[in-house]
Image (tube, rainbow, N blue to C red):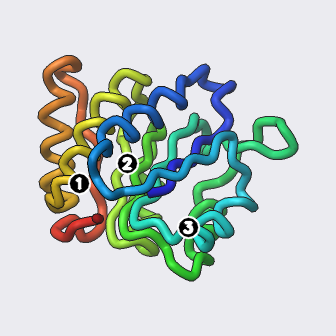
Amino acid sequence: MLFLSGDARPGGNDLGSEAACIRQALVGSLVQVREMAAVGLAEICRALDDHAPAILHLAAHSSFGGIHLAQDGSDLCIAYTDLCAQIARARFPPRLAVLNVCDSAPLAAEMSKTVTAAIGWSHALDDGQAQVFTRQLYRSLAERRSVGDSCEDAEAALSGPHPGCPPPVPHGDTGGRAL
């Protein structure tokens, strides 16, 4: 799986802790986790081609229909369509895209045209919500549960510490396994 994080400065996000949750959830599995922080748009297609991950996990801040990545050490807001175009260019696109990005349901819907399944949020989320959801999602995926069942497991875990938090929205074919 490939974990990409955008520029954390605009939202003051703790994206490193989210990556740690994934690593901890996958301990003991055969899944390798690759991490790239403060990634730029031009790096994404090459990273997908180099690593051919089954899962792409993107953690970043969003605003105005764009996602905050990095360019030359500065923040750069990239349109969702440009991000999807980079992923579509990959020789081996991932089967699942997990988008822990505020208001990313439209991005997930667009991305599900390129990847088998995508999970996005229809609202703003905080680091705590992202970490709880992510931890359980990857535990379930490592147990070889389907994307849909893993998403349901993660929603249940989220409802305990964050009651009333709307769950993320899966798009595409969630009946298969990502790992």
Placement of 68 over or under 125, stated as above or below: below
Q: Which mark lies nearer to you, 3 or 2?
A: 3
On the rendered structure, is 72 left or right of 64? right
On the rendered structure, is 172 left or right of 81? left
Q: Which mark lies nearer to you, 2 or 1?
A: 1
Give yes or no for contact between labels 2 and 1 (Cβ–Cβ under 8 Å).
no
The image shows residue 143 at horizontal and vertical percentages of: 16, 54
The residue at 44%/69% (across/down) is 94
The residue at 13%/42% (across/down) is 153
On the rendered structure, is 2 left or right of 140? right
Counting other residues with Cα less than 10 Å from the Cα at mark 3, is it few (<14), some (14-19), or many (20 or more)?
A: some
**Amino acid on which the number 2 mark rests in the picture:** Gly
The image shows residue 32 at horizontal and vertical percentages of: 43, 55
Task: Report helix, strand or loop for mark 3.
Answer: helix
Q: Residue furthest bottom?
A: 91
Q: Residue furthest right?
A: 72
The residue at 37%/48% (across/down) is 120
> Between disc 1 and disc 3, whose residue precedes?
3
Residue 148 picture quarter: bottom left
Residue on which disc 1 sits: 141
Task: Report helix, strand or loop for mark 2.
Answer: strand
**Amino acid on which the number 3 mark rests in the picture:** His
> Between disc 2 and disc 1, whose residue precedes?
2
Residue on which disc 3 sits: 51
Give the spatial CA distance, label 3 vs label 2: 23 Å
How many dots with numbers? 3
